[in-house]
Amino acid sequence: MNIEKFVREFADQYDDISTENFTAETKFKENDEWSSMTALSVIAMVDESYSVRLTGDDVRKSTTIQDIYDIVSLKVNG
Amino acid sequence: MAFLHIKNVSIKGLSACVPATVEENTALTNIATADMEKLIKTTGIERRHIATPATCTSDLCFAAAEKLIAELNWDKAEIEGLVFVTQSADYLLPATSPILQDRLGLSHNCFTLDISLGCSGYIYGLSTLASYMQNGMIKKALLLVGDTLSISCSKDDKSTYPLFGDSGTATALEYCEGDEGFKFVLSSDGSGYQSIIIPDGGYRSRFGTASLEQVQIEEGIARNKLQLSLDGMDVFSFGISKAPESVNQLLAKFDIDKEKVDYFFFHQANLMMNERIRKKLQLPENKVPYSLKNFGNTSSSSIPLTMITETAEALKSGSNQVIACGFGVGLSWGSMACTTKDLIIPDLVIYE
């Protein structure tokens, strides 16, 4: 897995806000667009690109894109 | 893996009954307009038929069954089995199916059974009743499936209340020697039991005064412990992974040509999830009907309700190869393949 690619894939799930400045350290819930619907898009992206099932708790306990990346990496390798 | 091939049984007819009251999601005032627009776009749910607190699932199923029996011209004395699938039963005990046997005027020689399952319930119910019938000792039987989950949702919970609609359905099964019958794959994962749950009121966590305390979970989500709690993210993640897998297992095991299937009926969860499942399976839109827009998520009855409201004309005339897949609360999921022929489908019954 590649963090830069993951950040771009993550950012693609936002439609309304500019995500050009998104990095691994971006706190992905701290913006005007994040909602439970965005969360579903992220879960779908992870399912499609990495064949991994993110749980509600995975998303709730994460703050940065890196946090989600770490969970996905662990599951991909698990 | 739990695969089943149950021969010599087929569906003769289907009917459904919904409460007369229609609630428009745009009319819900305790959810912000912008949020609601997004929610409708994501879920595909614009309106729902909702039961009044005095109406039980069994009332809706009773009305659906009466209409179906009449249009089938069945003699009630010949009906020897009744399976009722619901998670909104009349009482904690007794079971509701014997009550329905009596209300419908079926004979004492009719076996009755309640099954407590939701979104996967139609598939499990069909497999159970067809298994009882496959040797031909029982010739005619009814599968009654429905839920009134709108009553279990908190009006202050945007994660559940705008999603659920109510309905009751009846499916008539008959012994038909030589019929190819039904093929099933059935699965479970109880580790996810908390993803969709009404926490209190059963025996694990009995009803007490604390059960009625409304708790603010997050903005727009407040409920008490007798009300339905749904972890939308968990369920979404589960659905988009397991529903396509289940259908693929069925296709592979029984060597079914996807191209020859006329319709794929999925549990109606929400549009975003259902569309994701459809695309993963690479199914064309015209083979995957939805009743979400006008009825919402109707839990166990969503598959038969969709068959009736969206494809009745096609199912009434000629032969159709169909696949159905239910997935959700439990967690429990399963898929079924069968060929239907000239089904009897009465008009949708409206419960006043």
Image (spheres, rainbow, N blue to C red):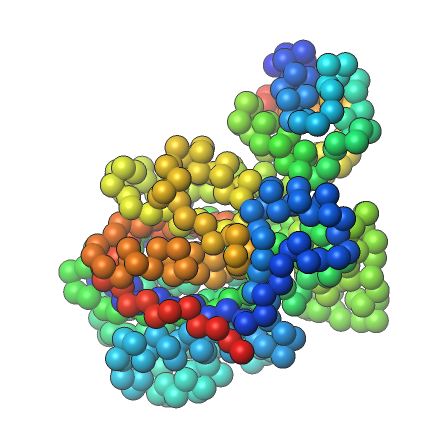
Residue at left 39%, top 80%? B66
Q: How many marks?
A: 0
Q: Where, by quadrant of the figure, is residue B161 drawn?
A: bottom right
Residue B216, visible in the rendered structure:
yes
Work out whether A29 lies above or below A1.
Answer: below
Q: As drawn, is B290 to the left or to the right of B155?
A: left
Residue at left 34%, top 74%? B68
Q: Nearer the viewer, residue B311 or B278?
A: B311
Residue at left 59%, top 23%? A76
Q: Quadrant of the N terminus of chain A?
A: top right
Work out whether B278 lies above or below B90.
Answer: above
Q: Where, by quadrant of the figure, is residue B57 drawn?
A: bottom right
Where residue B87 appears, as percent x and y from the top left, is: 57, 66
Residue B2, visible in the rendered structure:
no
Q: Nearer the viewer, residue B43 or B125?
A: B43
Where residue A9 appears, as percent x and y from the top left, is: 63, 19
Q: As drawn, is B220 to the left or to the right of A53?
A: right
Work out whether B226 lies above or below B185.
Answer: below
Where residue B279 appears, as percent x and y from the top left, is: 44, 33
Q: Nearer the viewer, residue B97 or B171?
A: B171
Q: Where, by quadrant of the figure, is residue A57 drawn?
A: top right
Q: Nearer the viewer, residue B208 or A34?
A: A34
Residue at left 53%, top 44%? B271
Where residue B300 appears, as percent x and y from the top left, is: 50, 60
Q: Quadrant of the C terminus of chain A?
A: top right
